[in-house]
Image (cartoon, rainbow, N blue to C red):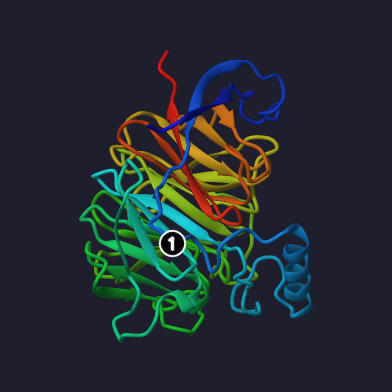
Amino acid sequence: MRILLTVFAAAGAAVGMLPPEVGRAQDSAYRLVADWPTLPPGTFFGQQRGWPDQAARAAAAAARRAAGGGGRGGARAAAPPIYGQGISGIAIDENDHIYVFNRGGQTVMVFDREGRLVRAGAERDMHGEPVAGGWLHSGEVDWDGNVWVVERMNHRILKFDPTLERALMQIGVTGEPGNDATHLNSPSGILFTRGGNIVVTDGYGNNRVVLYRPDGTFIKQVARGRGGPEDKGAGPGEWDLPHQGAVDADDNLYLIDRENRRVQVFDNRLNYVREFANAGWNPWDIAISRRGDDGVAFVADHAGERVHKIALADGRILATWGEPGRGPGQFDWVHGMAVDTRGAVYAADTYGQRVQKFVPVAR
């Protein structure tokens, strides 16, 4: 029987006013489902078992800076350290299967709601070459159940069939950065309109969001200028590291503008609609249920290593939980979010090398 540890969520302040940690009042609660998922014996997330200690992480960061990697990575960065970097992202399908995009021996691992491993795969591209060498950043499941893997350092995104056994399509040119209709530059995320068009956040090397037809044909992009590495901006439709996104039932696109610390909202033709932000946060991912009609989303906030439940109408924070650390209900670089049809919330932290499942407390 699973043990449930209670993690209290709290109401936040109004948008643009007090940071969410100020003036809290208990609003609702989520419970951590302990020991989720159940990994087969000898299996673990990431490149090796266990966490790196802080000294090892600091040394790796110093080495990366000395090599000219900087903070954002991309084409100019040296190969990133793999020690301890376990999970790059998560996604969910219509059957509430959780897809874990893993910087380890298995590229994609799929679990059911109970945490049992269902299948794994997406190991090789259309030419039989390994996928994981491109350093995964995230991934998504489209409306037909196909699985898309974002290979940041290979400047490409691969589409796999639902079995994860066969690569079907590629966006971007392997190993070649660029910002034209056929190239990507260290892409960060992917999502899909309800009609099947593809939206790519091309954010680590470039500063643009690109819209493609289902067959990968370029339609348009939204950016300041050409959307290249130097084309940062803070106006509507401009970006400083577009990171990931989600779509609601009305086909509105909610796109994380990471370094501008905001969410920009677009329609399904990638026309700007509005934006919202909360003081003190640094959103890295956003999750909306696949049905998308409940008016809420869940945001991975790196600033406080926490999760926020927000109202999609205005970004208002409805509940918050989490803090820095590696204990139950804590996060170490919270980077991926998903929510299932029963309201359970899944959060993945990169250095924590795990996914944690939280369920709402019945009231």
Whether residue 71 is visible, yes or no, is yes
Question: Residue 133 location, x and y as percent?
Answer: 48, 78
Residue at disc 1, secondary structure: loop
In front of the other: 62 or 118: 118
Whether residue 155 is visible, yes or no, is no
Question: Residue 12 location, x and y as percent?
Answer: 61, 24
Please determine whether, in this image, residue 59 is positioned above or below residue 21: below
Residue annotated with mark 1: 43
Picture residue at 66% right of the left edge, 19% below the top:
24
Q: Amino acid at mark 1?
A: Thr
Please determine whether, in this image, residue 291 is positioned above or below residue 13: below
> Which image quarter holds the N terminus?
top left
Please determine whether, in this image, residue 22 is positioned above or below residue 95: above
Is residue 340 found left or right of 257 in the rendered image?
A: left
Picture residue at 27% right of the left edge, 67% below the top:
164
In front of the other: 215 or 244: 244
Picture residue at 55% right of the left edge, 34% below the top:
308
In front of the other: 200 or 308: 308
Picture residue at 60% right of the left edge, 38% below the top:
277
Q: Residues within 10 Å of mark 1 (few under 14, many from 20)?
A: few
The residue at the far top in this view is: 363
> Which image quarter holds the C terminus?
top left
